[in-house]
Amino acid sequence: MTTQPRRMDPKKRTALQATGVVLLMGSLGWAAVPFYDWFCRVTGFGGTTGVAELPPDQILDQTVTIRFDASLDRNMPWTFRPVERQMTVRIGEAGLAFYEAHNPTSRPVAGTASYNVTPYSAGRYFDKIDCFCFTEQVLQPGETVLMPVSFFVDPEIVNDREAQFVHTITLGYTFFELDLPEEQAALAPGQAGMSDNTATASN
């Protein structure tokens, strides 16, 4: 006598299939994060810039105007602005610009900056040599800092059928608040109390 295999309840089968799809999509999504980041940096997709150690040896006579933009996440208490609104550089020439950040609060605040370049077609040709956005920044109560960004526009831009017609590039940053690093967080209560005592004494 042959025993027929028991069929799984349709509801249970559907639930298992749905769970499998969710797990598969989750694993693909996790793998896609580093791939997407690499893809953006290589192609300039979404205005992602490149990073270089040194400017190129070739400097062209053609120039491009770089505009600087600054914004803050709605929960970020700093003030943040470009020192210069724009500058003109030759293609391949290293440029240096500064942004100013100020912490008007009575507590240390840590932040990190996201960035992009518009138009997007110029993103892959805009390279940073050094930038405040590479590391998180911590400003003490009342502190104001000038933060540099060193950059150049790759001469290869003139060989791109779309990007070669770009004459103005906008570099934008948005600052977001972060949790304080452990060593800063440990000092924060004492610093806050010191600031309060100093304020009381001055009054």
Image: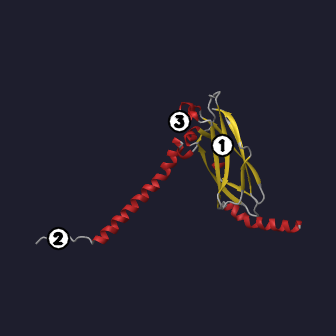
Q: Which dot marks residue 64?
A: none
Task: Report which residue position mark 2 lands on.
Answer: 4
In the image, is 50 to the left or to the right of 83? left
Q: Residue at x 62, y 40 (%)?
A: 169
Report the quarter where the N terminus lies: bottom left
Q: Amino acid at mark 1?
A: Asp
- When the figure is inspected, residue 74 is found, relative to residue 68, above or below; the finding is below
Given residues 91 and 22, the one toward you in this image is 91
| 53 shown above or below 185 | above
Residue 162 is labelled as: 3
Residue type at mark 2?
A: Gln
The foreground one among 58 and 74 is 74
Residue assigned mark 1: 130
Horizontal and vertical percent position of residue 88:
69, 35
Q: Are marks 2 and 3 in contact (CB under 8 Å)?
A: no
User: In the visual, does 139 lie left or right of 59?
Assistant: right
Residue 190, position as x, y percentages in the image: 76, 66
> Counting residues from the N terminus, which is met first, the one under dot 2 or under dot 1?
2
The CA span between labels 1 and 3 is 27 Å
Alpha carbon distance from label 2 to label 3: 66 Å
Q: Residue at x 71, y 53 (%)?
A: 80
The amino acid on which the numbered mark 3 sits, given as a three-letter code, is Glu
Q: Position of residue 166 (x, y in %)?
A: 59, 36
Measure how far apart labels 2 and 1 are at the Cα level: 70 Å
Q: Secondary structure at mark 2?
A: loop
Disc on the earlier residue, 2 or 3 = 2
- Mark 2 packing: few (<14 Cα in 10 Å), some, or many (20+)? few
Q: Which residue appears at 21% of the width and 71% of the height?
A: 6
Pick the front one: 12 or 89: 89
